Amino acid sequence: MKANYIEDFQEWTKDFSFYIEVRVRFSETDMYGHMNNTVSFTYFEQARIDYFRHLGILMPAAIDENVEGIPIVADLQCDYVRQVFFDDALKIYTKVAKVGNSSLDIHYLGKNQKDEVCFTGRGTVVQMDSRTGKSVPLSVEARNHLASLSIL
């Protein structure tokens, strides 16, 4: 398994500690019982939201009274490693891989109940001003908070 955002797979997996648990529902599978390829993105979304809550950041922080920052997913990628089936119990791990001026690069790791890697992913979340549609910098407080969590 070689995704372009993973240099050393063993090292990459060491940084994950937060995860959510999901069970693949019947409605998320195709006629062969395989998890539909779009479902991993829904799992990433829930894991990302729960992770931000866990960190105490829900990415928009008030920048100033003239800016209303909201988090927008700018890109999202999933690399499939192993088949996933109806009723599989999955752990979806999430971490911040990189902090930019107005964005966070989030990485994901999906494992089944046998602790086997089923898929990996990454995506960029950008803080955008909802009124202008332009990206806006993360607040100093948000950056400091992320640094204090030792995830940079």
Image: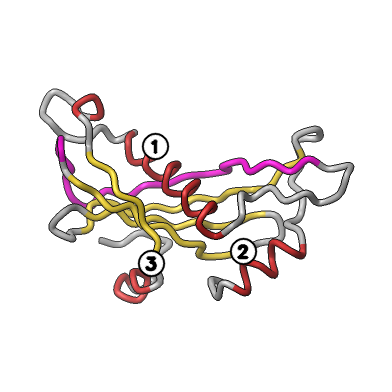
Taking the view exactly as shown, the residue that stands out farthest to the left is 32
Q: Circles 1 and 3: CB distance less than 8 Å?
A: no
Instruction: Locate residue 36, reporting x and y percent.
Output: 25, 32
**In the rendered image, which quarter is residue 149 located in?**
bottom right
User: Looking at this view, is 92 or 20 the one in front?
Assistant: 20
How many numbered markers are drawn?
3
The prevailing secondary structure element of the residues shown in magenta is strand
Q: Amino acid at mark 1?
A: Thr
Query: Between disc 1 and disc 3, whose residue precedes?
Result: 3
Which residue appears at 55% of the width and 51% of the height? 124
Q: Circles 3 and 2: CB distance less than 8 Å?
A: no
Q: Which residue is mark 3?
A: 17
Q: Which residues are magenta?
A: 68-87
Taking the view exactly as shown, the residue that stands out farthest to the right is 66
Which residue appears at 78% of the width and 49% of the height? 62
Q: Amino acid at mark 3?
A: Ser
- Above or below, 44 relative to 102: above
Local crowd size for mark 3, using a 10 Å CA cut-off: few (<14), some (14–19), many (≥20):
few
Q: Which residue is mark 2?
A: 99
85 is within the stretch colored magenta:
yes
